[in-house]
Amino acid sequence: MKKKTVITILALTLAAAFCLTGCGNNSAPEPATESSESKSDETEETGDTTEQEEAADTENEADADQKAADEVAALIDAIYVQERTDETDAQCEAAKKAWDALTDDQKGLVEGENADPDYFGKDTGDASKDDPRNQDGIGENEILVVSFGTSYNDSRVSDIKGIEDAIAAAYPDWSVRRAFTSQIIINHVQARDGACIDNVNQALERAVSNGVKKLIVQPTHLMHGAEYDELMKAVEAYQDQFENVKVAEPLLGEVGNDATVINEDKAKVAEAITAEAVKDAGYDSLDIAKEDGAAFIFMGHGTSHTAKVSYSQMQTQMEALGYENIFIGTVEGEPEETSCEAVIEAVQKAGYKKVILRPLMVVAGDHANNDMAGEEEDSWLSMFAANGSFDRVDTQISGLGEIDAIQQLYVAHIADVMNL
């Protein structure tokens, strides 16, 4: 073979080898690319798994929070009852202890048939300023002041304690004690604040065990309604346990047969509450308020009891006194003409442009703060404002019990029966 031919063959061989090597280099990244994608997939799968685990943990946490809140709600619902039992004290303690163990977030989740975060969480004032008046060592003469009650600490002090203090000052030779007719409220105050208030039966038992001989019962209730009837039954059951038992009149005195019946008690109440409302509104007189286009609405509770005519009688009394810009209403709308809608229509028809809402209740508690002055759309404040006929709607959150003239009316009722 010639030398030239050999060189040519070698060159061709080297060229072929170079081409083969070059194709190999071009295809070499493919395995590397597959390896990178595989790692990326693994990372994504790991990330998804982590997110799923975190979501599951969050869900489990939320479930645990709700479960803890539901357990507290059930404990609150268990003491939101009108009957006291041997377990009541322990139930009140357990409910508060369970509430205190919740986190702030868990407390916000508490929701039951009657339970909500406000049951323990709402600040209603300093309970230590109150006096449950459940002391023994009563002596032979007792005045038992019986109220429906309130869980609003400030209102309990200014309204109920205010009446009790006035009675104690007027009759220093008598021991003044307290009873509430609402076990629901008694339980609430006991569970939240650790203050033990007697119900009527407990208070009567306390009087018997202390050797009380003369007992005067003064109900702070507005009228001879359902609560008053229940009180009378309880007192009658203990009648033979004392030498002398008298029950004084509630605030508005005798009921009467129809809306036209008024009496001295109703006149004094009408004058007292109107004067206080006018003063708090910044007017020198009711006539000046009228000239300014202002109307005052006193909102009571209302009742299906036959005593509901007392509200109509109070409207009659206002008219008899010449109080044309005073209107009586009720939360329950019983009687019919006292419903919020009916009162709005009456005030609107009379042409008043300014409205002042005030409770016709011994205490400024839940009804005054929520049903009257609350932010919900069905509160009286909201309904009057939504009507659009009034330039201004204000509220005065004050109970009747803090008015001196009202306190003295209870004092006078006791004097009426003391020497009978």
Image (spheres, rainbow, N blue to C red):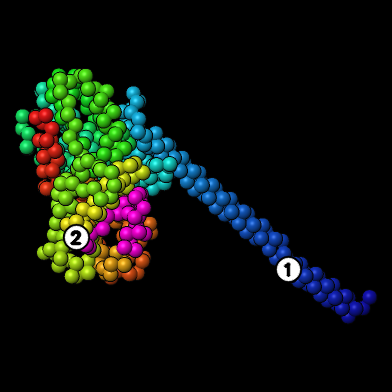
| Image location of residue 109, percent across then percent down | 41, 46
Report the number of numbered marks.
2
Identify the residue at horizontal 27%, vertical 55% (top origin): 328
Q: Give the CA separation, mark 2 to mark 1.
A: 107 Å
| Image location of residue 245, percent across then percent down | 17, 26
Identify which residue, 282 or 27, lies in the foreground: 282
Residue 277, above or below 187: below
Mark 2 residue crowding within 10 angstroms, few (<14) / some (14–19) / many (20+)? many
Looking at the picture, which amino acid does disc 1 mark? Asn
Identify which residue, 191 or 309, lies in the foreground: 309
Identify the residue at horizontal 22%, vertical 69% (top origin): 293
Q: Secondary structure at mark 2?
A: loop
Q: Is residue 70 visible?
A: yes
> Which sits earlier in the primary sequence, circle 2 or circle 1?
1
Which numbered marker is on residue 324?
none
Q: Which residue is mark 2?
A: 323
Residue 238, above or below 298: above
Span colored in magenta: 324-346
Query: From this viewpoint, which residue is outermost toward the bottom?
Result: 4
Q: Quadrant of residue 12?
A: bottom right
| Image location of residue 150, percent across then percent down | 26, 42
- In the displayed structure, does residue 134 sit left or right of residue 190? left
Which numbered marker is on residue 25?
1
What quarter of the picture does the C terminus occupy?
top left
Question: Are the residues flagged by discs 2 and 1 in contact, CB closer than 8 Å?
Answer: no
Identify the residue at horizontal 22%, vertical 25% (top origin): 204
Residue 342 belongs to the span the image colors magenta: yes
Disc nearest the viewer among 2 and 1: 2
Q: Secondary structure at mark 1?
A: helix
Identify which residue, 363 or 120, lies in the foreground: 363
Identify the residue at horizontal 21%, vertical 62% (top origin): 324
